[in-house]
Image (tube, grey):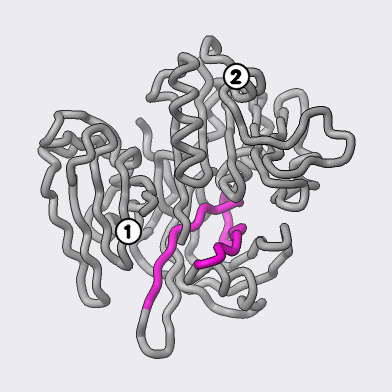
Amino acid sequence: MTTTAPVPTPSVWKVGVVASVHTETPTARSIMIDVPGWGGNLAGQHLDLRLSAPDGYQAVRSYSVASAGPGERLELAVDRLPDGEVSPYLVDDLQVGDELEIRGPLGGWFVWRPEQTGPVQLIGGGSGIVPLMAMARAHAASGSTARFKLLYSVRSPHDVFFAEELASLASEHFEVTWVYTRSTPTAWPTPAGRLTPAVLEAATIPASENPAVFVCGPTGFVESVADWLVALGHPAASVKTERFGGK
Amino acid sequence: MTHLDGNVLAGPLSELFSVDMTVAVGRCAGCGDQSVLASAMVYESGPDIVVRCHHCDDVLMTLVQSPDDLRVEFRGIQMLRVTR
């Protein structure tokens, strides 16, 4: 494997400044952050974010980066977890101009590089869309003609991240399939329901085409989908997963 | 407790290694499985991390983090391989 990650000093904590915030859903928002020395990132990489309380208590969380490519500005998209320690602050309290300690870009495994020409199947559950969005953006920005498909499982139309941008990215090389688990848009052809092996098989690039598959979402979602993909004939090595927990 | 995966090790292990260790292959001392660290199962308890083999559930390593230091115990990793 080639390691071309533009990572000068990932272990060093840098100070980022919030440049803008944007509401994505009733429980989530995207956050643009300027990080001097960031140096750009590959699509799918993450960062560690450290918050320090006045009493010295520190909390570190990993967040996928929604943006990709060179530059010092990056985008996160964070969903508020009900019992979370960090995400409620990021979603409800963080303001433009606030500083955040950031370490990254991190991780060279759950990444897509524009020089990869083979077909790619992205499968996201909830805010698991974030690193997949970075890949979809990198795919479009690079003019890649690699076949990309995204299967995006969300509770309802109100819970969709990057709704307008996803619609604008649709092309002959990028196709999105939606699964609504609790409620659907009006006049949607199928009732709301959890993703099933049958829907997965029908909506994704078949194993016979040897796609690279990226699955990101809550742990249970990721494990179910990964098991189904292997049962459908995808080699385990072709299925890359990234889980996020419930903290 | 729900678990994460080895992708989250990238940050802490960057303090110890000069290359991205999530793409390093480790061999489990328990079952012999060889996989990238990214695919291991990670259990977090505050700042502390237990990494388990995704195949046999044995403990591969533990990370204990404090403001002053990072302690990594390679309890069940028999071998680590990185690509040059």
| Residue B22 at x, y percent in the picture | 32, 44
In this view of the protein, which residue sits in the foreground, A95 or A73?
A: A95
> Is A156 situated left or right of A105 in this image?
right
What is the crowding at mark 1: few (fewer than 14 residues within 10 Å), some, or many (at least 20)? some
Which image quarter is the N terminus of chain A in?
top left
Residue A159 sits above or below residue A235 on the image:
below
Kind of residue sitting beneath label 1? Glu
Q: Are marks 1 and 2 in contact (CB under 8 Å)?
A: no
Residue at the image point whose x is 54% and y is 78% from the top: A99
The residue singled out by tag 2 in the image is A201
Residue B14 sits above or below residue A131 on the image:
below
- Label 2, secondary structure: give it: helix
Q: Quadrant of residue A132?
A: top right
The residue singled out by tag 1 in the image is B44
Residue at the image point whose x is 60% and y is 19% from the top: A201
What is the crowding at mark 2: few (fewer than 14 residues within 10 Å), some, or many (at least 20)? some
- Label 1, secondary structure: give it: strand
Write down the region rendered in magenta.
Answer: A58-83
Kind of residue sitting beneath label 2? Glu
Residue extending furthest toward the bottom: A55
Residue B46 sits above or below residue B50 on the image:
below
| Residue A60 at x, y percent in the picture | 40, 67
Residue at the image point whose x is 42% and y is 80% from the top: A52
> Is A113 situated left or right of A145 in this image?
left
Asked if the magenta segment contains residue A94, the reply would be: no
| Residue B58 at x, y percent in the picture | 18, 41
| Residue A80 at x, y percent in the picture | 59, 64
